[in-house]
Amino acid sequence: MRVLLLGPPGAGKGTQAKRLTGAFGACQVSTGDILRNAAQEETPLGQKAAAIMVKGELVPDALMIDLVAERLRQDDCRKGFILDGFPRTLEQADGLEGILKAMGSELDCVFLIRVPEAVIVERLEGRRSCRGCGALYHLVFHPPARAGVCDRCQGPLYQREDDWAETIRARLRVYEAQTAPLIQYYRDRGLLKEIDGVGDVDEIQNRIRQAWGEARA
Ligand code: ADP
Ligand code: ADP
Ligand code: ZN
């Protein structure tokens, strides 16, 4: 499976990508996770990215394309990949095409997860992530058994700095201006599969798997 998940912040890309990896043996490539890890480790890339992420803006295309090129060449991506959060601009989409072509590979399809803005805000404001294993929770929709503690690894849960109301609005504007044009880009290439992103997590996972089945047929 070589696919990407497209959709606004909070659409459920990370949540759905994690479930697909288990079922299809493909690795999840989340550029947001890679950047947050780099920021945590205070690498030069991480320090640069952190200052951009906190404002809800985008890390420069050239940096992102290099980072993904390196990631997709690692062994665990050979069985397939699920890109989550990349590409986010037309320049990155062209970059991805180039990376895959050079590897003798191409995308199977693109899932666009659609959710109305009111749902996005609700999801982002309640999002919590595990510092230890990256598992995703939601205060209301998917709470951990014990408040503030990961069910899987007992790690501490935290709220992302960019999930505050002000920054959420900035990110939505960035999505509309810079990322939404990718919808037509992939539609033109016959790769786009639209998924209704409203409903519970399992329901949406089933919609994606059904669309995947259709894409392969
Ligand atoms: P969300 O899942 O809420 O959409 P991500 O975790 O994908 O957020 O990304 C968080 C932040 O990391 C973005 O707001 C942006 O600053 C940066 N980022 C992640 N992926 C990219 C990318 N492909 N290009 C540029 N910046 C990115
Ligand atoms: P994205 O990667 O697109 O930014 P996430 O997968 O991080 O989105 O999901 C954002 C928040 O919404 C998380 O707190 C997650 O637990 C929650 N969430 C994801 N999918 C659903 C859903 N179908 N119903 C309710 N909450 C959801
Ligand atoms: Zn955990």
Image (spheres, grey):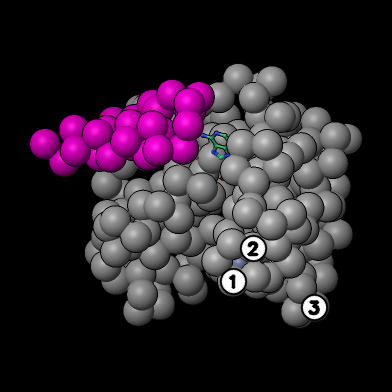
The residue drawn where x is 19% and y is 38% is 213
The residue singled out by tag 3 in the image is: 42
Q: Nearer the viewer, mark 2 or mark 3?
A: 2
Q: Report the Cα–Cα distance between label 1 and label 2.
A: 6 Å
Residue under numbered circle 1: 153
Q: Element under label 3?
A: loop
Point out residue 123 in the picture as x, y percentages from the top left corner: 67, 35
Q: Are marks 1 and 2 in contact (CB under 8 Å)?
A: yes
Residue labelled 2 has its Cβ within 8 Å of some atom of ligand 3: yes
Would residue 163 appear left or right of 85 to someone viewing this image? right
Q: Are marks 2 and 3 in contact (CB under 8 Å)?
A: no
* Residue type marked 1: Cys
Name the element at disc 2. loop
Disc 3 crowd, CA 10 A, few/some/many (<14, 14-19, 20+): some
Q: Which residue is mark 2?
A: 150
Q: Residue at left 64%, top 24%?
A: 119
Mark 1 vs mark 3, CA separation in Å: 24 Å
- Image x and y of residue 136, in percent: 60, 53
| First-in-chain label (2 vs 3) | 3
Q: Is residue 157 above or below residue 209?
A: below
Q: Nearer the viewer, residue 125 or 58?
A: 125
- In the rendered image, residue 216 lying in the magenta stretch gets the answer yes
Label 1 CB less than 8 angstroms from ligand 3: yes
Q: Give the residue type that dot 3 points to.
A: Glu
Please state which amino acid type lies under the numbered disc 2. Answer: Cys
Question: Taking 210 as reference, is 82 left or right?
Answer: right
Q: Which residues are magenta?
A: 190-217
Give the mark nearer the N terminus: 1 vs 3: 3
